[in-house]
Amino acid sequence: MDKLEKPILKEVSAIVFDKLPQHDTCWSLLEGIDGKIYTGVCGEITGGMSAYIAAFEPGTGRIDYLTAIADVLGVPAGNGQATHSKVHYSMLQDDDGIIYAATHCTGAPLDDWLWRPWNCWNHPDKFFSGSGLAAIRPDGTVLFSKIILPKEGSRCMALAKKQRRIYGISYPRNHFFVFDLRTKEIRDIGRIGNINPQCIFLDDRENAFTTDDYGQIIKFCPDRNEFIETGVSIPHAHFRNGFHNTVYDVTPDPGANAVWGVTWNWGARLFRYDFDTGRIDDFGKAYGEDGKAWDHIIHDHAGGLVFGPDRKLYFAANLRDAGGRTHLICFDPVSAERHDLGEIAVPEMPCDHIARGVCGKDGCLYLAEVGNTPTRLFKCDIGYTAKAENKNIRTWG
Amino acid sequence: MLNDNYFRDIEWPQSPLKAENLDAEQLKQFLRIRSEYEKSAFVSSGHLEVRALNPKEFMEPIPPGESAVTAVAAHPSGHVYGGTSGKNAHLFFYNPAPDADACVDIGVILPEARTVALCVLPNGMLAGAVNPCEPNALGVLFSYKSCAYLLDEKDFTGLGVREIFDLPAEDQFFTSTIDPCHSAGKIEILTSPIPEKISDLQAALDGSCLYLLGAASGQIFRCNIDGSAVECLGRLDPNGIFSEKLFLDHVGNLYGAGLYGRIFRWSPENRILEALPCVAPSLKGRELYNKITAWTCSSDGSIVGGTVDGLLFRFLPDQNKVICLGKPTAETFVSGLAWSGGKLYGIFGGDNDCAHLGCWNPLTGELKDLGCPLARSERPWHGYRFSCMTTGINGTIFMGESDRISHLFMYFPAVE
C-alpha cells in the first residue's frame, strides 16, 4: 500500500440514520467480518424508543436496520418503563459473524425526557427491566436474548473468544460480570468501584483490563476469577489527582501485545499500555495545550481511536481553541507527532462528539457520533483505498 | 432485517425538549427540573461520610472481597468496632477523635468467614461470632481485648523502661506531625460452642454469659464468656423458620422471633423461653416469610424492629403489644436500625437494591425516606449494600457497607 507523505483529510461525509428521526446517539461501532460497519443507533433525549442495530455497507452505501432491540427483548419501547434505547460500548462480534449487543439504561420512558436508575429503581412503572443481551446474525436473525442484569445497564463489554465469555460492567452499581456463552449464565464478580469505566480491553491471553476509581489498571484473571491490581495507573491532567480518571476508548496496537487509549474526560490524555512489560507511556494531552482547570466535556473530549492504513493512530478530539468543534487528529506512534487534519463536519450540521471509530475495508475511517438528531456516522476519507492487515483485532466495545 | 414497511407505520414519540418555540419559562423550568432530579435520589438532610477500612494516607484498605462490614458495635470508649466477611474476616476499629478519624484494621479473625455479631461486654472486652464459609464448619466465638484492657491486666514486673514506654494505653490512630502511629489489642479465637453455625450473639447485661442463636436449628443457647458450659434455652420454631437476629433489652430480657415473626422472650428471672402474643407486622400474604431483620432500643428503653418487608414496628413488651409504624422507603429488608437525637434511623434494601436511609420521628409519627447514601468525603462513594448499623457516643450513626469494596459509612443527622 502506498503511503502518503503526510496525513490528510480528503473528504468528510455523513451517513445519516434517517429512518430513525428522533434517535440521537451512536456509541458502539464495529467493522464486521463481512466488511460492513455496525452500530447501535440509540435515543436518549426522547423517551419511549428502542435502540436499533444498523449496518452500513461501504461499497454500496446501503444502510440496513437489523433489528429493534426492545422488540427482541420483549420489552416494548412504549410500555412506560425505562427503555432499551441504548447500546453503549456493549456491541461485539464473534468470528462466526454473530453480533452480541447488550442494552444500557438512561433512556427515559415514553413521554418522559429524563431518567436515572437511582430515582426509579423500585418505581412501579418507570423501572428499567435490566440489560438485555441479544445474539444476532448479520441478516437480523435473533439467536437468543436474555435479560442479564436486572435493573441495571451494561456500560461496556469485551468478548473473550477463546474462552467463550463476555466481560462487562454494570451501571449504576459498577459490578464486573462474566457471561458464559456456552451456558448462557452470568456470574457477578462484584463491585469494582464507584466510577463506571467506559472500556474493558483484553490482552492476547484474554485477561480483562479496566480501571478503578483512581485510574489504576486492574486485571481480571479468568483462571482465578478475580481481579489483581497492576500498580500501573493511566495518566491524568496535572490539575487532577487521578480520581475519576477512567479509560474511555482503547484500541489494540497493530504490532504488539499492547493498547493505545485515551482517558475520560477533562484533560483527556493519550497513553500506550504494554501488557508484556506492564509499562505505560503518557503521551500527554490527546491534542492541544494542557488546560489549567476542568472544562465542559464538549470542549475537551477525545474518542474514536483507530489505526489507519498507514499504521498511524487517528482519533477525534473536541478542541477548545476551535470553539469545541470536533477535529480529526493523526498521531504518529513512531515520532509522537500529532497533526490536526481538520474539522469533522458536513455543511448542514457540525459534529457534536465522537465515541468510537473503525477503519473500513475501503481505507476510510468511520466514526460514531453522539449528540445530534438524527444521528450519524462520519466517513473520513484519509486518502487510502484499503485498510491494512492487522493481526490484533479489537474485541471490545 | 427491518424493511421499509416496518418504519412506515411508526409514530415516533416526541421529546418535549425538542418542541419548537419553547418559551424562556418553559426552558428554565426544564433546566430546574433536571438539576433537582439528578440529586433528588440521594440523602440531602444531614451529612454523610465514608471511611476506608484503614487510614488511607498510610495503608491500603482491607482488600476488596474481604471488606464487607457485617457487624458493628459501639464501645463506651467512643470507638466503633466492626467485623468483615469474605476471603478473610477482619476486625477493625474506628477512632472518632479529630486527630484520628480513621478506621484501623486490627487483624484477621478467620480466613474465608463471615462475622455475624459483635458485642461489648461491661468490662470493655468484645465478644464476637464468625461463621466459616465452609458448609459443614461450625460457628466460632472470639474475643477481643483492647489495648486499654490489656494495660489493665499488665504485670510490669521485670520490664525495662523502654518496654514499658512502648506499651500502648488505648486502641488508637494518631496523625502526629512526627511519628504517625497506631495500636490495637489482641484477637483470641475461643471455641465452637454449639454444633452448628451461629446466627447471632448477645451478651448478658452483667457480662456473665453469652446468648447464641443456632443458624440451622433456631435454638437459643447460653454459655460462659469463653464459650464453655453451653446450655440450650429452647427453640424458636420446630421447623427452623425463625428470624436470624436476637435482641437484648435494657433490663436484660432476650428476644427472638419464630414463625410469622412471632416474638419470643427469655428472661433471666423466669428462665423459660416463652412465645409472646406479639407478631411482627408483615405485608398481607407474606406472613410465612416474615422475619425480624433488625432490632434496636432507645435510651429510654423503647424497642423497635424492622422486618424483611421493610416495615418498622414498635414493641411494647409490658403491654404485649406490637405497633406497626409503616414503611418509609420502597425498599424491603431493614438491614440496620439506630437511634440518634430522638429519632430512629434505618437502612433499607437487599443485596440487589440501591439502599435507602429512612427515618421515624416518634414525636410526630412521621416516616421519611431520606434517600440513597452518597458521600463525598473521604472519597466519593455511593452506598448500595449494607448489613448493620449502630449509634456512636456522639449521635453519629455508623453503617456497615457490605459490598465487594466496602467502607464504614457515617451519618450525621441534621440538627433541628
Image (cartoon, coloured by chain):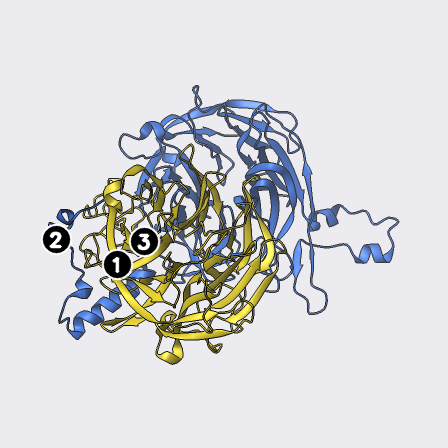
Chain colours: A yellow, B blue
Instruction: Tell me the subunit letter for badge 3.
Output: A
Residue lying at the far top in this picture: please name it. B238
Q: Chain of mark 1?
A: A
Does mark 1 fall on the same chain as mark 2?
no
- Judging by the rendered image, the residue that carries numbered circle 3 is A39
Q: Identify the residue shown where x is 12% and y is 53%.
A: B11
Is B40 drawn above or below residue B270 in the view shown? below
Query: In the rendered image, which residue does mark 2 sit on?
Result: B11
The residue carrying pointer 2 sits among few (fewer than 14), some (14 to 19) or many (20 or more) residues within 10 Å by Cα, namely few
Q: Secondary structure at mark 1?
A: loop
Relative horizontal placement of residue A145, taking residue B149 as reference (left or right): left
Query: The disc labelled 1 sits on which kind of residue?
Result: Leu
Cα distance between the residues tagged 3 and 1: 24 Å
Q: Amino acid at mark 2?
A: Glu
Spot occupied by residue B227 in the image (x, y as percentages of width and height): 64, 30
Q: Nearer the viewer, residue B142 or A303?
A: A303
